[in-house]
Image: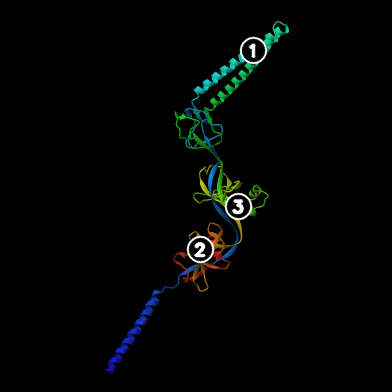
Amino acid sequence: MKTITKIKFIVLLSSIILLQNCTKAAEGAGAPPPPELPVYTVITSNTSTFQEFPAALEGKNNVEIRSQVDGYLDKIYVEEGAFVRAGQPLFKIDSRSYGEQVNMSSANLQAANANIQKMKVEVDRLTTLVAEKVVSDVQLKTAKANYAVAVATAAQAKAALSGSRITNGFTTITAPVSGYLGRIPYKKGSLISKTDATPLTFVSDISEIYAYFSISEIDFIAFQKKYVGATLEEKMRNMPLVDLVIADNTTYSEKGKMKMIDGQFDKSTGAITVRATFPNPNGTLRSGNTGKVRMPQLMSNALVIPQESTFEIQDKTYVYVLGKDKTVTSKPVTISGKTDNYYFISEGLKKGDQIVFTGLGSLKDGVPIKPKMISSDSLFTATPL
C-alpha cells in the first residue's frame, strides 16, 4: 500500500515538472525577438533651408472691361482667352444715336459761330455811328453785351460738341492694357448698360505675377531683425530671391523678388500681407493660380533629422528616441526649418541623440528594439540635404 502511494506521488511530481517545462517552452516560443530597426544619430549642419507660405497669384494688372454708354452690342472683335494689346478694339456698341448727337452739336456750334459774326458786324457798325455822334453809346454797349453772349454761347456749343464726340467714342471699347482676355458673357445683340453688374470681360496683364501671402507678427519681427537696412524697402532689397512652388509641387522656373509689405496687420488674423513679384515671360502663370512662396534661410549648426523619422499627433511632431536600455521613448520636437527631405530642430533634441529612422508604425513607448546604426554620410549620399 505504501509502495502504491509512493508511485502515485512520483507520477504526480513528474507530471507537474513536465507541465512546467512545456509551459516554459511555450512561453519561450511565443515571445518574438526585438525588431531590428535603423537608428540615426542626430548631427548639426550649416545649410540653407526655407519657409513656405501659401500664396494667391494675380496678374500685374487685372482690369474689368465695362461700357460707358448704353446700347446694343453691335460687334465683338476678339475671342475669349485671346492676347490683346493696349488700344486694340474689343467691342462696338451701336453708335447711330450717339452719332446724331455729334451732328446736332456740330450744327449748334455752327449757328453759334454765325451769331458771333452777326453780333460783331453790329458792334462795328455802331462803333462808327457813335464816333460820328449819330447814335448814343448806349446802343453800342448793348451790342457789345450781345456779342459777349454770342461768344459764350459758341463756347458752350463747342463744349457740347466735344462731349458728344467723347460719348460717341465710348461706343468703341478698347483694351486699356495688354494682356489676356477672360470670358465674354455677352453675345452680339445684347443690350448693354453702363450700370450692368457683370463686366463685358476682363483683361489680365500677366507679364509679371504678384504672389500675395501672409506672415505672422513673429515672422515679421524676425524679418526686420534679419536683414540690413534703415527702412523696410531697403531690407527687402537686401533679401535673397524667393522661389514659387506651383500646384503640382514643382518649383517655378523664375525667381521672385520681395516688393511690398502691407501698411498694417489684419486685426482678425494677426498677420500682414506681403507681395513677391515673379517674371512671367511665357504666360505660364495666370491670375487665380495658387502656390507657395518659398523663402530661403541660412541655418547655422542646425540639428538635422530626416522627415520620415517623425510622426504627428494633434498638430505636434514627435520622434522616437533610443535609450541606453535599447527601448524607445516618444519625444516632441520643434521644427525651425526644412528642406524637401529633412527637418531642422530648434527644441526637443540635442547633438548625438539617437532616433529611430524608419518603421515607426509599430512602436510605442518602452518597446525594446535591436538598433541597426546608419551613418549620416550614407544617408546624405542617398538623399542629399
Looking at the picture, tell me which residue is in the foreground, 104 or 380: 104
Location of the C terminus by quadrant is: bottom right
In the rendered image of this protein, does residue 174 appear above or below residue 261?
Answer: above
Going 68% across and 13% down the picture, which residue do you hit? 141
Q: Which of marks 1 and 2 is in front?
A: 1
Where is residue 165 shown, x and y percent of the image? 56, 24
Q: What element carries label 1?
A: helix
| CA–CA distance in space, label 1 to label 2 | 97 Å
Q: Mark 1 points at which residue?
A: 119
Kind of residue at badge 3? Phe
Q: Mark 2 points at which residue?
A: 318
Residue 106 appears in the picture as rendered: yes
Residue 385 appears in the picture as rendered: no
Q: Nearer the viewer, mark 3 or mark 1?
A: 1
Q: Is mark 2 on a helix, strand or loop?
A: strand
Kind of residue at badge 2? Tyr
Q: What element carries label 3?
A: helix
Where is residue 194 shown, x and y percent of the image? 50, 31
Kind of residue at badge 1? Met
In the rendered image of this protein, does residue 182 appear above or below residue 345?
Answer: above
Bin the neighbour count of mark 2 within 10 Å (Cα to Cα): few under 14, some 14-19, many 20 and up: some
